Amino acid sequence: MLRPAHSSLVQLAIPDEVILRVAGLTKHFKTGKAAGEILRAVDDVSFDVPVGRTLAIVGESGCGKTTTARCILKALQPTSGSIWFRTASGTVVDLATLDAEQIRPLRTELQMVFQDPYSSLNPRMNVRDIVGEPLVIHGVQDRAEIEQRVGELLELVGLRRDHMTRYPNAFSGGQRQRIGIARALALRPRLIVADEAVSALDVSVQAQILNLLLDLQDAFHLSYVFVAHDLSVVKHVSDRVGVMYVGRMVELAACEPLFERPLHPYTAALLAAAPKPDPSRRNATRPPCGEAASARNPPSGCHFHPRCPYAVDRCRQETPAWREAAPLRFVRCHRAEELELPGVEPQAAVLAEA
């Protein structure tokens, strides 16, 4: 898909049910350690997010999940690629071409829930000011109106109105994350990027926050990009799952088919590595040996081949293409059709049972 040179506002043949289309997204960083040395944090990533649905992005630490999320919101400027977003008016805009001033009006439609509920809230601001700050930035000046809307938002996420006078140190981790969610909802966004939104919380609190996000999605028809590394969390909240490895997306599929029969050996290895409470249900596939490749100096061919038990010479020499191996199932593997990789039973990964 070519980006028009004259304008970032265009009418494209993107299906009406798609709110976000990421095409060929790439983000490189200059490391400064050697002339011309770069870190390929995100390398040619593409996916769609349907309206009112959740796309989860999973992978090991350092695979590029968070960088992808920050590029979508223009917290980082992509090196190349397109980020097509359908606004509330129906116009499709390429966020990758917008500068800070141009994207500011769209901040009301794009918001983020951060990973750490302890560092993402200003300890010197009370809850009213934290949740109300987006309203002030976007032109709401009446203090009574701000207080009214903040109170409504707190009740919406399971807190009380009288909490607005307190400071973050008075709350637990789960309560702080509820405050962060209320802040993200303040401008009534259509797309929320949740970056490891429950990874810092206890399991029982994780379930509460995840169920809250699902309830809010139903109530406000929200679309989510959910970044995570916990597959039980992903299974509980997502409609589609994208698996990343060393900056590349290696598999993208609906949640159930991906868990039941992965097409990429790395996806199968991730599923095998997920803890299972019942020893009799352990997966026959072993977790991958060795450490993940470096995005600064990735292997030739398929980045996963040094850890893949199914690798052949072609995997070591030729970079696999991103292709649709089955209807609505995308994979980056030369041998996807010929491998029979084990998945997991659906109930083995459901957090709601905890």
Image: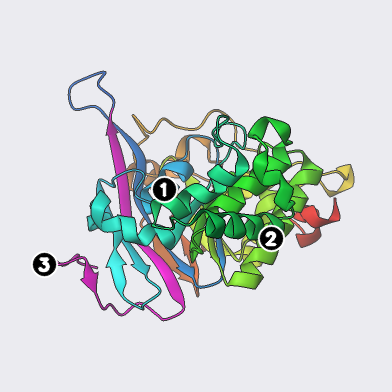
Q: Between residue 212 and residue 32, name the one nearer to us.
A: 212
Residue at x-position 88% and y-position 45% = 278
Residue beneath disc 1:
68
Q: Are marks 1 and 3 in contact (CB under 8 Å)?
A: no
- The residues colored magenta run 1-30
- Name above or below for residue 290 compared with residue 42: above
Which of the pair 195/29 is nearer the observer? 195
Does the segment drawn in magenta span residue 4? Answer: yes
Q: Where is residue 139 in the image (x, y as percent from the top left)?
A: 39, 57
Location of the N terminus (image quadrant): bottom left
Q: Which of marks 1 and 2 is nearer the N terminus?
A: 1
> Disc 1 or 3, which lies upstream in sequence?
3
For label 1, the crowd category at 10 Å Cα-Cα, with few meaning under 14, some 14 to 19 and many 20 or more, is many
Question: Residue at label 2?
Answer: 156
The amino acid type, in three-letter code, at marker 2 is Leu
Residue 345 at least partly seen: yes
- The numbered mark at residue 6 is 3
Q: Which sits in the foreground, 98 or 305?
A: 98
